[in-house]
Image (cartoon, rainbow, N blue to C red):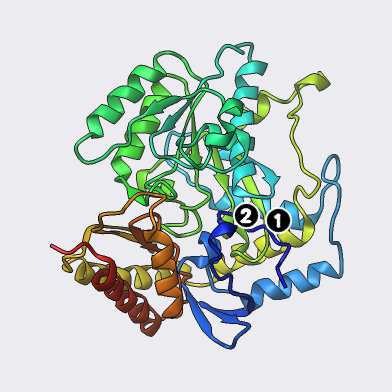
Amino acid sequence: MISPVWHPFTQHGLGEPIPQVVRAEGAVLHLRDGSRLIDAISSWWVTTHGHCNPRIAAAIAAQAGTLDQLIFAGYTHEPAEEVARGLIDMAPRAPGQPELAHVFYSDSGSTAVEVALKMALGYWYNLGSPERHRILVMEHSYHGDTIGTMSVGARGVYNAAWAPLLFDVGTIPFPAPDAEQACLDALEAACAERPAAFIVEPLVLGAGGMLVYPPRLLQEMAAICRRHDVLFIVDEVMTGWGRTGTLFACEQAGVVPDIMAVAKGITGGAIPLAATLAIAPVFDAHVSTDRSRLFYHSSSYTANAIACAAAAANLAIWREEDVIGRIAALARGIGTRLAELARHPAFTNPRQAGTIAAIDLVATDAGYLSDLAPRLRAFFLERGLLLRPLGNTIYIMPPYCLDADQLDMIFAALAAAGERFGAQP
């Protein structure tokens, strides 16, 4: 029987197999046919501590029998209050920089970023500067699939159909090793024209190809924005919750953004939830006795109580368990194996940030729409791995419970893929 389900980022016309997963535990997915997959990309970068973490699952079950859903416009509940306090307590801090002080809930990374953009424009509008509406973005960036977030991401085949709906932005070149100063100079010049905000993925550009840049550049970007009174927005949807080695990537640069979007690992990957954190001046610009100045954004499931309970359990895990220690050990294991794989002639450009690692396969058909990525996906599926290459870029981003044997299996499959698909000299 043909399934009625329409899957994301899936070309159903190719007839590729769509395995059915019936159970998950730790880093392993169990399929309907009895086979198993190692989830080497955390099921699209969301699963942190492992699938079906007992503490998070128990919190979800307990909350489901107490309060499931509540309108959040004018009402509140303790799980949301607890998570907000926890997020503010765990948010990046740095001497002399304003602290993130307010939390606005939503339900996905895309909406968390959409909220951040609306906060930034609402800030300037309410301060009497509606002309400050231009957004600056970084080349190759990705921030989501809503109209607003597509507008601030890279343009290409994945959003060409909706080009008439996208608003214009200013693009800053990616700070590649040979273009660092060009990036900073372009940002300085663009900020001098008084835009509303600059949005970045800190340290790692995910869907753009797992492109990595150093913390000192993030620090300089934030300083340029401060000098020109331009709001600095960081999208920690993917990089947050330990992926780059620290709880948030901003910490490595000593940067506190004006607005920060978080999602994915906020519940450990168990259930959808997102949040946008803002400094007090951004919140205060929307506070008034004039009801027309309120922040006009919501969704039906804003701060869903069950999702907030999962997030509260996740925050407790971060406070009470040595998650950073697990991340550091996993990152060391990845780094050792990545260095060994990089000696293979079929691979080039290895890079790593914490538990995120990527390497490029030397291939003649390396484009995003080439046949290479689907062939690689099928190759890895046959070897018991969930991996989803970006063109010729193969990356891993596993849950922190991954063990050494599972890591060996992943890198053995990567080496075999190099033998099978790498360009021949």
Does 403 sit above or below residue 118? below
- Position of residue 80 measured from the top left corner of the image (x, y, whole percent): 74, 53
* Res 20 label: none
Q: Residue at x 52, y 35 (%)?
A: 160
Q: Which residue is mark 2?
A: 86
Callouts 2 and 1 close, C-beta under 8 Å: yes
The N terminus, quarter of image: bottom right
Would you say residue 356 is visible in this rendering? no
Q: Residue at x 23, y 58 (%)?
A: 362
* Res 82 label: 1
Choose between 204 and 329: the one closer to the eye: 204
Tag count in the figure? Answer: 2
Choose between 88 and 148: the one closer to the eye: 148
Choose between 387 and 318: the one closer to the eye: 387
Would you say residue 251 is visible in this rendering? yes
- Identified by mark 1, the residue type is Glu
Is residue 95 toward the left or the right of residue 163 in the image?
left
Real-space Cα distance between discs 2 and 1?
6 Å
- Position of residue 166 measured from the top left corner of the image (x, y, whole percent): 57, 28
Q: Residue at x 44, y 79 (%)?
A: 382
- Position of residue 340 measured from the top left corner of the image (x, y, whole percent): 20, 71
- Identified by mark 2, the residue type is Gly
- Label 2 environment density (alpha carbons within 10 Å; few <14, some 14–19, many ≥20): some
Does 46 sit above or below residue 285? below
- Label 1 environment density (alpha carbons within 10 Å; few <14, some 14–19, many ≥20): some
The C terminus, quarter of image: bottom left
Does 246 sit above or below residue 219? below
